[in-house]
Image (tube, helix red, strand yellow):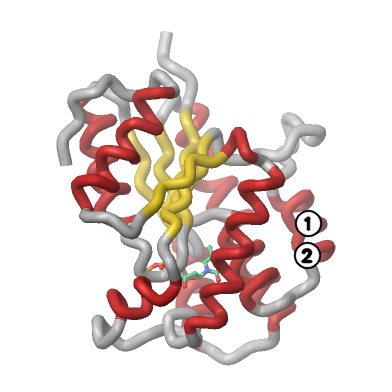
Amino acid sequence: MAQPGLFISFEGIDGAGKSTHIAGLAEAFRAQGRPVALTREPGGTPLAEKLRALVLNDAMDPLCEALLMFAARRDHLLQVIEPALARGEVVLCDRFTDATFAYQGYGRGFDLGVLRQLETWVQSLPENPVQLRQPDLTVWFDLPPEVAAQRLAGARVPDRFESQPVAFFTRVAAGYAQRLAEQPSRFARIAADQPVDAVWLKVQQAFVQRGWLTPQGQL
Ligand code: TYD
């Protein structure tokens, strides 16, 4: 019988270095014969990618921003994430709802109660309306905002989030810490202020500990 699907999200402030490790994990899972769905938020479907372009580039008020993030998420969840999980795939999702709490809630200062309501609506599924869909594991790459700013400096044309000052990312990081405090068993916090190999080792350990990977995955 096929193994049950796994839903993994990856979080961190801009510059925290998620992408390399997401690619490494995809390879490690595939090497062990698990089908992988690589995806991202906002985005992951044609509609959600259109919303991504708007929300990353066009000026808008915080409610509009939060609604678009969750609209993109609903489409992504129904069109991509749920079907992949039903097929027994490992869904590796670059950001999910913790990003909305961290960026819109803590970064922008938007009402957390409204975000909780939106989370409840968007992550309820018709077949199981009582239990919200949440990641099985959220890997949080925790990097000091000053270090992230140095890494990002001059890297490319910044979007509406990347162009924020360090103080914004300090609040975003506090938002991630708060989400972890609320749901500790869902999170693996990885100290990301280390060489990439050391971080990769920690990432692998988080999956090996849970019995989801055997220890030989290489980056
Ligand atoms: P990111 O994931 O860093 O992608 P890339 O590596 O292509 O830049 O960019 C997505 C941006 O969107 C990032 O700055 C965080 C922001 N974001 C939110 O503000 N709220 C959300 O709910 C999500 C999913 C992302």
Marks 2 and 1: CB-CB under 8 Å? Answer: yes
Element type at mark 1: helix
Q: Position of residue 208 (x, y in %)?
A: 35, 24
Q: Residue at x 58, y 91 (%)?
A: 59
Question: Height in image: 34 above or below 84?
Answer: above
Q: Amino acid at mark 1?
A: Arg
Q: Residue at x 40, y 23 (%)?
A: 209
Give residue 98's quadrant in the image: bottom right
Disc 1 designates what residue? Answer: 116
Residue furthest to the top: 1
Image quadrant holding the C terminus, namely top left
Query: Seen in the image, is 2 located left or right of residue 186?
Result: left
Question: Height in image: 10 above or below 4?
Answer: below
Q: Is residue 44 visible?
A: no
Query: Seen in the image, is 120 located left or right of residue 211?
Result: right
Give residue 37's quadrant in the image: top left
Q: Is residue 162 visible?
A: yes
- The disc placed on residue 63 is none
Q: Residue at x 23, y 32 (%)?
A: 28
| Mark 1 Cα-neighbour bin, 10 Å: few <14, some 14–19, many ≥20 | few
Q: CA distance from mark 2 to mark 1?
A: 6 Å
| Badge 2 residue CB within 8 Å of ligand 1 | no
Disc 2 designates what residue? Answer: 112
Q: Position of residue 157 (x, y in %)?
A: 31, 88
Element type at mark 2: helix
Question: Height in image: 82 above or below 143?
Answer: above
Q: Amino acid at mark 2?
A: Leu
Which residue is more in the foreground, 58 or 158? Answer: 158
